[in-house]
Image (cartoon, grey):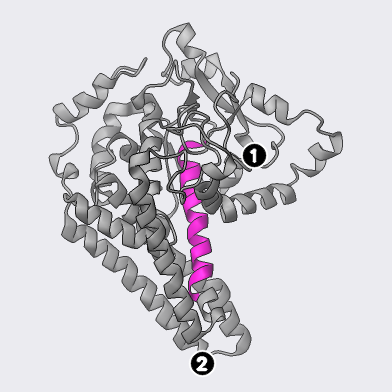
Amino acid sequence: MPRTYITETVHRATVKDGAIPQHCFEQCMALSMAYVAFDMVQYVALLATTIWLHNRAGFWASFAIRYLVYPFLAALPLTGLWVNGHECGHGAFSKTQTVNNAVGLILHSALLAPYFPWRSSHARHHQYANNMAADLNYVPLTRAEYDRSQVGRMAWQDLGEDSPAMVSCRILLQQLLGWPWYLLSHITAGPESSPRKSRGWWDNSHFLPSSSLFRPSEWLGIVISDLGIGSMIYCLYVLGELFGSWTIFWAYVLPWMWVNHWIVMITYLHHTSPALPKYTNKSWTYLRGALATVDREPGFVLKYMLHHIIDLHVIHHLFPRIPHYYAKDATDAIKPLLGDLYHVDKQSYWAALWDTFVQCQWVEPDQQKTTSSNIGGESSDDEGILWYRAGPMPPVATSMRRSGQMLH
């Protein structure tokens, strides 16, 4: 593989030359359903065990099990179910699109996630991954935007706002509210990521049939997704009437909040790293954007419980229809071709969250880094390859950037 400017011919040659085994591109519905069943059995087993212990343990032991231990553990198979729904959205669950949509709708609705709207916006994330203007996830500030965010900042703020305590609070805020707020406001998306011009902050929601995020023809899928979520909320209400609201809180709401955490942590760390570039329109290509992705080492439990969405994500951006159970075979096959263009980070997953949060505040060109990374081309092209910089944290973002707001 050439070690200089990346072209789309490499992507096509990978398939045509048979570098990746053909079986990796085959979806097996029976195997996919087995993983769904595996996740569901684990969740039910954890819930049943917790109820059994609750009826036999003392007050404080029962409290710790129900409100601390169980929610953390139960969120793992529930996040696994979300990952299976993610597979459905890409057509990697089954060869039949009807099955993909039906299973994806059920799984994501059960987790209060809008399947069809998310499927649409997530497909555009894959189409424009790491494009500063058009990507939909974690688009960083440019130098000009970052400088504007620091105007009027006092010296005491530099001492207080970037202290370990404040960084911890900001990370906690991102992890707790990042996913639902993204669904409501399209936060962190690029200013040109919507098909239509936004009419206001309220018009960037995944739940609104007339949202600027979607084409008019997609309204029915949004309505169906809203009905799916509404049905789940009604089921929770009925269960609350039967078993009590506090039971629903610890049995469903707390694990659901952990699921939101995992979704944010996974997606944030996929493309945010000092070692990964971002691209302006003039320098971006599909393959360049797809390869600005890192495989991370989350440890044995997360690796398998979350179906390799953390440690085998590079191949997913190159070939989204490869099922997660064949992702390792495909990754092993393509790594020799990619060479230094394959990114992997073996540090602690939790340490990576902290380091990334404090080191990745804004982006700007860096010719030396571009040259050493073997992704550069012409000097004019290199100006559109941007790298993360550290600095004081900018103010918390609350809404999507408007078209024309980004300055280079």
Instruction: Give above or below for 140 relative to 186.
Output: above
- Give 212 or 51, whichever is nearer the viewer: 212
Q: Nearer the viewer, residue 132 or 120?
A: 120
Secondary element at tag 1: helix
| Residue at image mark 1 | 358
Image spot of residue 393 (x, y percent): 69, 37
Relative to 77, 144 lies left or right: right
Q: Which residues are magenta?
A: 251-272
Can residue 305 be seen at all in this image of the molecule?
no
Check residue 103 in the rendering and tell me which mark sits there, or answer none: none
Q: Quadrant of the N terminus?
A: top left
Q: Which amino acid type is shown beneath numbered disc 1?
A: Val
Crowd around label 2: few <14 · some 14–19 · many ≥20 (10 Å):
few
| Residue type for callout 2 | Arg
Image side of residue 48 versus residue 402, left or right: left
Q: Which mark is residue 56?
A: 2
Q: Is residue 237 visible?
A: yes
Q: Earlier in the sequence, mark 2 or mark 1?
A: 2
Q: Secondary structure at mark 2?
A: loop
